[in-house]
Amino acid sequence: MKITKVIAIATLGIVGLSSWSISNNINELAPANDSVRTGSIPPVSVSPVSPSPEFPNASIEVAAVGEKNGKDSTKVTFNFTLKNYELKLQTADNGSKNCNNSDKGQHIHFILDNQPYKALYEPKNEVVLPNDGKEHYLMAFLSRSYHESIKSKGAAVVYHFKVDEKGNLKKLANPKTPMVFYSRPKGDYMGKDTTNVLLDYYVWNCSLSNKGYKVKAEVSNLNKPSQTITTTMSKWEPNFIKNLGTGKCKVTLTLVDKHGKPAEGPMTNASREFNLKAQ
C-alpha cells in the first residue's frame, strides 16, 4: 500500500513538472507582443501607401459650364474633358492595396467647397445652388479605382465661381493662395476595408516641405478618445491609417505654414466623420 502511494506521488510530480515545462516553452515560443498578452489596443498609425501606377500624361479640364435658372436656386452643369485617362477601368494594382476599392473603377472626385466629394464615372455633374452670391470653389481630380488621387500636373482643376441673386453664374479668378481639399476617408468602411483606411487630400497653389507648408492631420476614434493622434505631413503622398478600431471616427486636415500656423485664405481646413464597422 505504501509503495503504491509513493508511485502515485512520483507520477503526479512528473506530470506537474511536464505541464510546467510545456507551459513555459509555449510562453518562450509566443511572439513578444504586449498587446496580444495584455489585450491592449495597438496605437493608431499613419504610414505611406506603397507606390501606385503613375499617369503622368493624364489630364482633366472644365470643358463647359451650363446653368438653368430658378426663382431661388440655379442648376449648374459641369462638363469635363479628360485626356490619357479612362474612367470605369480598374487600376492595375487594386488587388494588392488591401483597402477600399470602387467596383465601378476609376473616376473623378468632385469636391465643392470642401464638402464630401461625389464620385463621377461620367465626365459631367450637376449641382443645385442658391441664388445668394456666395463664392464657390470646385476641385475636380482624377482618381484611381481605390480612391487615391492622381497628383501629376494637369490631373486636377479648380473652378472658382458664384451664382448671383438673379441666378446668373459668374466665373471668378482662381485664388493664388495655398489650399488643401479633403478627399478620404469618407463614408462607411466594412470588415477588411477597416484595416487600411486611405488618408488622401489635394494641395493647390503650394508644395509641401520640411521648411514650407505642411498638412496637419488629427485622426481620432470618437468612441475611444485615447486613440487620437496628430501628425504633420511635409510630403504630399497618400497614407494609410491603421488600428483605428471600429465606430465613428473623424479626421481634421489643416494646411499650416512654415511656422506651424494655419494658412490664410479659403479652403485651408476641413473635417470629416466616417464609420468603421466590423461587419
Image (tube, helix red, strand yellow):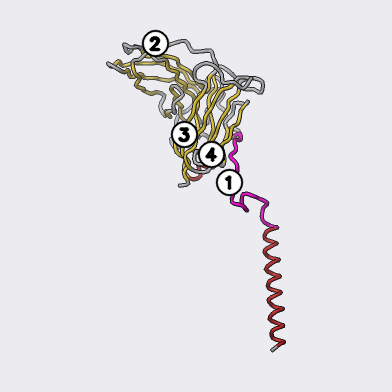
Taking depth in this image into account, of 11 and 176 the one nearest to the observer is: 11
Q: Disc 4 marks which amino acid? A: Pro
Q: Residues within 10 Å of mark 3 (few under 14, many from 20)?
A: some
| C-alpha gap between disc 4 and disc 3 | 14 Å
Q: Which residue is mark 1?
A: 41
Q: Disc 2 marks which amino acid? A: Lys
Tell me if residue 212 is in the magenta stretch.
no
Q: Is residue 260 left or right of residue 73?
A: right
**Residue contact at pointers 4 and 2, CB within 8 angstroms:** no
Tell me if residue 38 is in the magenta stretch.
yes
- The x, y position of residue 53, in whole percent, is 57, 31
**Residue contact at pointers 1 and 3, CB within 8 angstroms:** no
| C-alpha gap between disc 4 and disc 1 | 12 Å
- The mark found on residue 170 in the picture is 2
Q: Residues within 10 Å of mark 4 (few under 14, many from 20)?
A: few
Which label's residue is closer to the chain start, 4 or 2? 2
Instruction: From the image, state whether disc 4 or disc 1 is nearer to you.
Output: 4
Which label's residue is closer to the chain start, 3 or 2? 2
Q: Disc 3 marks which amino acid? A: Glu
**Image point 63% across, 25% down: which residue?**
234
- The mark found on residue 85 in the picture is none
Part of the protein shown in magenta:
28-48
As helix, strand or loop, the secondary structure at mark 1 comes to loop
Q: Is residue 30 above or below residue 47?
A: below
**Image point 58% across, 39% down: which residue?**
44
Which label's residue is closer to the chain start, 2 or 1? 1
| C-alpha gap between disc 1 and disc 3 | 21 Å
